[in-house]
Image (tube, rainbow, N blue to C red):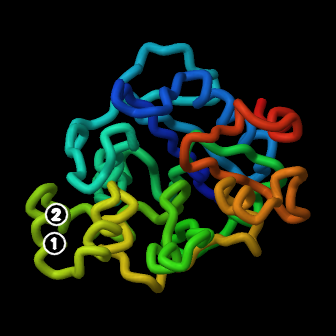
Amino acid sequence: MGIQEAPLTIVFWLWRDARCWTQYTPEHVNTCARMIHRNLTLAHRFVVMTDQIDAEFDPLITPIPLWDDWHDLRSPEWLPEFPQCYVRLKAFSAASRAVFGERFVSVDLDCVVTGSLDSILGRSEDFLICYRAPIKYDDRKSRYQSSMWMMNSGAREAVWSKFRGEQSFDAIRGKCKPEDARRFLSTDQGWMLYALGRTEAGWGMKDGVYFWPWLRANRMTAKLPGNAKIIFFQGQEKPWDLLDWLKANYQ
């Protein structure tokens, strides 16, 4: 009998932030885990990094206390009601291997899974991230959307080790044009773009990864695109509030 391959760790994030316009709950975590579990045959396990360690999570999910590093850091270019996610950057540290294992994928809770994820999460590159679906021309400069990224633990350790909070904000302002600085200061996603450059492997619409604002802008919300496998809802609209075909998958 061969050696069993280590399972992929699927990481969710849940913490309280009264300023944020969307208030996530343990049930959002449970629903997201159920959707992925139904649509993934690869060996996997779920963890949630959370400040609600005693909440009622599904037995599929292992809750882990969320670290404090950069938890309260606020971007000066980001509206108060927008999520501030610099706390997630420590996932790029080599030390994250002790928590997440050899390979993990971070998945935002505001998604709906509509098809098999095997081809998406079965990729072997040492790092992948969602490609941004551009609505405006300037969106093309942003390149990545941090709704989902997957990596071998420690594969992009510099994203963590080079981040210095407000010192990094000041360095970005000193090196970049104002319009570029605003993009790089858009919470953890902006720092990822700044630190990673523009050549990372990733997933896009051809892979079945979609974003609701793009579907809405292109009047494609009445039914699923034929190859859709997962749709993310960055912004105020969320899958649990919308169309029947979304709600049918969101459970």
Relative to 43, residue 129 above or below: below
C-alpha distance separating marks 1 and 2? 6 Å
Relative to 212, residue 73 above or below: above
Along the viewing direction, whichever of 86 and 5 lies nearer the viewer? 86
Q: Is residue 60 left or right of residue 207?
A: left
Q: Are marks 1 and 2 in contact (CB under 8 Å)?
A: yes
Q: Is disc 2 placed on a helix, strand or loop? A: helix
Q: Is residue 227 left or right of residue 179?
A: right
- Check residue 169 in the rendering and tell me which mark sits there, or answer none: 2
Relative to 182, residue 243 above or below: above
Q: Is residue 175 left or right of residue 3?
A: left
Residue 27 appears at what percent x and percent y? 61, 22
Relative to 26, residue 139 above or below: below
Image quarter (top left, top right, bottom left or bottom right) of the N terminus? bottom right
Q: Residue lying farthest bottom?
A: 199
Q: Can the viewer see residue 41? A: yes
Along the viewing direction, whichever of 210 and 121 lies nearer the viewer? 210
Res 32 quadrant in image: top right
Residue found 46% across the figure and 28% down from its top = 63
Task: From the image, tell me which residue sits under label 1.
Answer: 173
Q: Can the viewer see residue 121? A: no
Residue 207 appears at what percent x and percent y? 74, 70
